[in-house]
Image: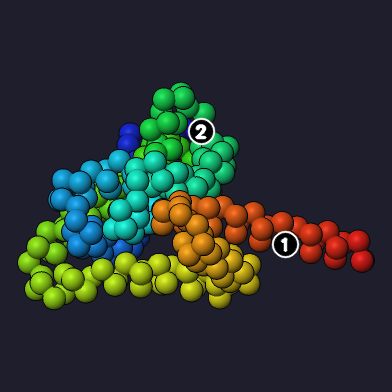
Amino acid sequence: MINTRKPGGEFRTGLQAGISIAVGYFPVALTFGLLARTTGLTLYETVLMSLLVFAGAAQYISLSLIAIGTGVFEIILTTFIVNIRHFLMSASLNEKLEKEKGWIKAVYSFGITDETFTVISVKDGRAKTSFAFGVILISYASWVVNSGLGYIIGQVLPEFLQVSMGVALYAMFVGLLVPSMKKSVKVVYLAATAAALNSVFLFTTAISEGWAIMFATIISAVLVELVASLKKKGAAQNE
């Protein structure tokens, strides 16, 4: 069968498929820019973080850690833990996308987020590399541009609103957590265990807030998964 697609057709299709992601990123990236300014970052640092990290949850967590004076190593390690799921998403897309050179895979793997992964993975058949680049490019551009735009808007906001934006950071985390808690009781246990452990570490040890958050996250995840595995094993034995 003759391929009648014009050159660049898959790339344009990817751009069109990524428009919904770009629109969805607009308010989230805008808020990130506003919060980055109230946290003390410069416009250059805000845009550079979005350029080099391109991970919404990780960037928001980084802001909260920066706000409490956490060290660089702790921030990097926490970000790694939060984004460890990207290993699985990358492995999955490696099977979905056409065979390509390693360096090209490395380039588009940088642009894998929950949203771009979903759009690329649900495409019928084997996805073209150019399609993935189209989806990622428009999503990436929206995130970076709107992060800078949010920072600029923050400069013209009244001072009392700028100060109050610090509270919005915690509201954002609550907004991300509650929907997940409604879908899975495991998330409820995970959040409660992590919060309890974080409090214990802060009030009974001399470790910093950053390390407390990181240790609480790792230990709670291991404990909850261990309990869930034991329950499944017990249920299987009783059948």
Disc 1 and disc 2 in contact, CB within 8 angstroms: no
Residue that numbered label 2 is attached to: 98
| Count of numbered marks | 2
Residue at x 41%, y 28% (from the top left corner)? 104
Q: Label 1: which residue?
A: 228
Q: Residues within 10 Å of mark 1 (few under 14, many from 20)?
A: few
Image vertical order of residue 234 relative to residue 124, above or below: below
Mark 2 nearby-residue class (10 Å; few <14, some 14–19, many ≥20): few
Real-space CA distance between mark 1 and mark 2, rounded to the nearest whole angstrom: 37 Å
Quadrant containing the C terminus is: bottom right
Q: Is residue 142 left or right of residue 111?
A: left
Residue type highlighted by circle 2: Glu
Please state the horizontal and vertical placement of residue 135, each as a whole percent of the image: 37, 47
Q: Quadrant of residue 228?
A: bottom right
Left or right: 199 with respect to 20?
Answer: right
Residue 238 seen from this side: yes
Where is residue 41 drawn, in percent x and y? 19, 52
Q: Which residue appears at 71% of the width and 56% of the height?
A: 226
Q: Nearer the viewer, residue 204 or 47?
A: 204
Query: Between 221 and 56, which is closer to the camera in this rendering?
Result: 221
SS at circle 1: helix
Select label 1 or label 2 by which is in front.
1
> Looking at the image, is 69 positioned above or below residue 125?
below
Residue at figure coordinates x 41%, y 57% from the top left: 209
Looking at the image, tell me whether mark 1 or mark 2 is earlier in sequence order.
Answer: 2
Compare residues 127 and 113 and report the one nearer the observer: 113
**Circle 1: residue type:** Ala
Query: 209 and 168: which one is in front?
Result: 209
